Image (spheres, rainbow, N blue to C red):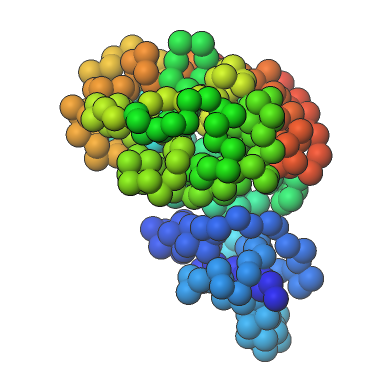
Amino acid sequence: MPLLCVPIIANRAELRSERGPARIAACTNTPFEFAPRPVPNLVDALPFYRYDATTCQRACRPIQEIIREKTSMLRSLSSAVVIASSVLVSLAAHAQDAIRVGWTIPAEEAKYWIMRRPERFPNLGKTYKIEFTQFQGTAPMVQAMVAGALDCSTQAPLSLANGALQGNLQAYIVAQHVGERPGSFSVYWAVREGSSIKTIADIKGKSVGTNVFGSGILGPMFLLLKKHGLDPQNDIKLVETGFPGSEDAIRTGRVDVGVLNQPFAARAESKGGLRKLFSLADQQPNIVHILEVCRKEFVDKNPDLVKNYVRDLTAGMKYALADRTETLKVVNEVIKSPIEVLDTYLLKSNDFAREPGAAPNFAGIQAMFDTYADTGMIKQKLDVSQFRHPSIVAPME
């Protein structure tokens, strides 16, 4: 029987600490859906997640247990509400110059420049501040945004769509980090060099790897399989390998076909022995992978603060594209990958595309929303215009 679970996080300060994101990531390491809130405000407004009993990990607690504990505390808490409210008002006034930003790795060079070369951004630390928190992927960040624990964060089109449809997240897309365009790197699936699999039709009955179940890359991939006469639900066995472990899964035969993404694709190609079978670009050109999203409520209340942030994202992207040598150093400092490895792909033709000034490709995002609706990955159509602010969007000078 499903359990309703929440991450074990004592308060919002802990959510913004190093432990908070890790615990959310542990609690949300499997596909989830936002569950109804029958007892709102009992767990500090953190969203609830529905899991099978076997996947409610140690980092999570069954909501039934929390309800019993919290209910016994309600009477003693009532007298503290007035005091806490006045403190929160004071803190909110103090925090108007700060923006809480979630980030992850890889492919967020504009943010990495802001973090590692702050002296290049004149307004940073003077007219406004950024509180950065690292997360292990976009899904936990959208959950933190729904909870009000982040103001802006990295999102993929699918995680943003799920946040809007399942968690009622209202947000603006303010910038874009990476995507695909003709001539750039495109996420692809590969087989061993000697494999008998020569065409997409040949993968019927075979095991096919993905980074994670429910991943955004599966929408275009499923449509491509259908175009070649395959039923993605019944004709293949989908195996979760993660991006880092995908190469090994192909070479050892754990999967017949595996997915490769940078920087792991460059590493695999340098070793040889694998053959590309198909890519996302074969189905859908100009795919958008990673966006920067800010909560609508926060933007509407703090437009000048968000404008400063978007200006710096614009500048950060320009710095990244204009000075590749320095960008290699910046990325090395953040993700700890050796420069000689980064140099094999980063900002080269075998890397993802980056738009000058971090401009979002809204037409491409709309195409992604349509793909997810067509494949049943989201429950209804979405119009990208609801995520577009009339003036606060990169590039901004």
Classify residue 311 as left or right of residue 168.
left
Residue 103 is at least partly visible in this image: no
Quadrant holding the N terminus: bottom right
The vertical placement of 320 against 45, above or below, is: above
Q: Residue at x 68, y 80 (%)?
A: 64
In percent of width and height, residue 52 lies at 63, 69
Q: Residue at x 40, y 15 (%)?
A: 318
In percent of width and height, residue 280 lies at 55, 25
Q: Residue at x 30, y 39 (%)?
A: 335
In percent of width and height, residue 349 lies at 37, 13
Tell me which corner region of the image, top left, top right, bottom left or bottom right, holds residue 344: top left
Furthest residue in direction front, as rendered: 196
Residue 184 is at least partly visible in this image: yes
The vertical placement of 177 against 336, above or below, is: above
Q: Nearer the viewer, residue 107 or 69?
A: 107
Classify residue 328 as left or right of residue 368.
left
Furthest residue in direction bottom, as rendered: 72
